[in-house]
Image (cartoon, grey):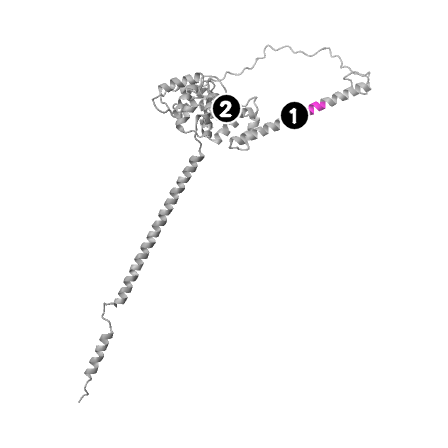
Amino acid sequence: MPPRRNTRANSSTDQEGQQNTPPTGHLDPVVIQLLNTLTQQTTALAQQQQQQIQHQLLQQQQQQHQQQQHQQQQHQQVLPVVTFKSFQAAKPPEFKGSADLVEAKAWLKEMEKAFTLIEVTGEKKTEYASYFLKNEASYWWGTSKALEPEGLITWERFTELFLEKYFPDFMRDQMELKFLELKQGSMTVSQYDTKFTELSRFVPTYVDTEKKKAKRFQQGLRSWIRSKLAVLELDTYAAVVQKGMIAEGESDSYMRDKENKKIKVGTSDKVQSQGDLQSHPNKKPGSQPGRGTTFKKPNTGNAGPINRPPNNNQQVVSRPPLPECKTCGKRHPSICHRLSITCFKCNQKGHYARDCKTGILCH
């Protein structure tokens, strides 16, 4: 017979194994509690860190706001209150309505310098500046101000009205022509520089860059100075003026040395001639030393200088008349200056604003 199986022992062993193995899909309550505790702590820590970050950001914003307020308070304390007395202390010039364009432009320039120095605000500029208009200029401003709309007249509007009165278009055309015809001539480079700077203020379109300003100034120099500067290829106005003064100074020094040498040579010849007369008292001036006899030229039969009668058949060569310029109607040999004149109304070249026929007003 086959042996019996010990079913009881086997069944007991199976029961013990089932009791020791935890059921699938279930965790120990202790582990679950630990996991919940860790989750709560992590959440609380994240919330705490977020609160700290928000608190730091709030503190930074408060500090920045306090710093800005402190800087504004300091700026307000440093800036003085601009009054008319403080502006008057800068001693801006008066303007009495002169017809001199240079004086009118200079007055505007000095006023703007005083505004910058005292830090005058925009709404006070016209009020302060108009006080320094005297005589005819004060009367003009009174009538012009009455024609303007009620309210604040800005400094820009005041400047526009001022230039229309004391620097009209036809005067600008005249100053433009003077500038285009300006040459050094008999002036020194320094004097030419002063005149060039004075006129260039009225024609800013011709000198709005350093290169254009330098080229225009160099073209007006004397030919021998201009030829010396041409090889240097200078692009700045200051460099052209400086090199022109150097070339002029070298030429003046050379001429002085040359004149001094002539004076020295003439003095030495005079002293030598006086010494010869003292050593030879019987000698006539102009005779050669060591010779007591002077020879005369033989008489050729024609005494006195030879005078040739004028030849009536000889014709005098005269230059042909210069052609009439089609641009300006005058006779001149060089290129017409009007070709470089620009109209302030239509920006076309060849005519002035007063002769403009387009009817377009350009500001």
Q: Is mark 2 on a helix, strand or loop?
A: helix
Q: Quadrant of residue 229?
A: top right
Pointer 2 residue: 198
Q: Nearer the viewer, residue 316 or 272?
A: 272
Q: What is the CA distance from the residue labelled 1 to the residue labelled 2?
A: 31 Å
Pointer 1 residue: 256
Percent x, y of residue 84: 44, 25
Q: Residue at x 74, y 22 (%)?
A: 269
Q: Which residue is drawn at 42% across and 35% down?
A: 76
User: Which residues lie in the magenta part?
Assistant: 254-265
Q: Which of marks 1 and 2 is in front?
A: 2
Quadrant placement of the C terminus: top left
Q: Is mark 1 on a helix, strand or loop?
A: helix
Percent x, y of residue 12: 21, 80
Q: How crowded is mark 1: few (under 14 residues within 10 Å), some or many (20 or more)?
A: few
Residue with the most extreme left position: 1
Q: Nearer the viewer, residue 131 or 344?
A: 131
